Image (cartoon, grey):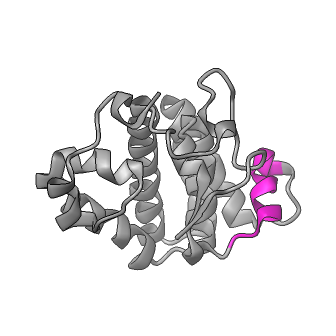
Amino acid sequence: MTLESSRVPPAPAEVYEPIFGSEPGLRRRIHAQASHLTADYLAWMTALRTKGILPGRLVELVRLRVAFHNQCRSCMAIRYSTGDVSEDLVCSLEKPEEAEDLTEPERAALAFADLMATDHLRIDDATFARLHQHFTSPEVMELCLLVATFVGYGRMDSALAMTDDLPEEYADPDATVAPWRQAPVTFL
């Protein structure tokens, strides 16, 4: 697949440059096709990472776990520095309930994220009771907003098949990739 053969083609430079500058990655050039919304959406995504009350580490772990369920290659390839997450910690996401380096609140958040990404109808009062053991109501609501955004955004990016600027190991549409198997390619 070439840059021009993505499921939605990249916007022309005159559309994406005012939003992203002269050399954004493929994702941003494609997202710029909705330039009337892209700046506000970017502000929302930035607010999730910078204005939240949940620890950056937890947000990054949840984001990567949801990216795996979505099979969003571009999401798995990115590491945000606000998360302060080592690659060893990323490897623990393969089996979070067994991971020694995760806290109980992180396990509860990841279990919630797993359900939201795979079988949201199984979320029940017990799921929220577990969250409330570790988080305040504002933190639980923030987690809900984060996970909902990550699930929707990652599924959209996965469906758009935007892997052209990623290493080949991310590009095979028949392979199941995971942030604990493939090396990250971008740190933001």
User: In the image, is 19 to the left or to the right of 67?
Assistant: left
Relative to residue 87, is residue 149 depicted above or below?
Answer: above
User: In the image, is 130 to the left or to the right of 183?
Assistant: left
The extreme left residue here reads: 36
Picture coordinates of residue 131 (x, y %)?
58, 59
User: In the image, is 180 to the left or to the right of 74?
Assistant: right
Q: Nearer the viewer, residue 88 or 33?
A: 33
Relative to residue 104, is residue 69 depicted above or below?
Answer: above
Picture coordinates of residue 83 (x, y %)?
60, 73
Q: Is residue 118 visible?
A: yes
Residue drawn 78% across and 45% down?
A: 181
Relative to residue 30, is residue 58 depicted above or below?
Answer: below
Picture coordinates of residue 136 (x, y %)?
50, 72
User: In the image, is 66 to the left or to the right of 91?
Assistant: left
Residue drawn 66% across and 76% down?
A: 84
- Residue 173: say if magenta: no
Picture coordinates of residue 53 (x, y %)?
46, 78
Q: Quadrant of residue 20?
A: bottom left
| Residue span colored magenta | 85-97
Q: Quadrant of residue 71?
A: top right
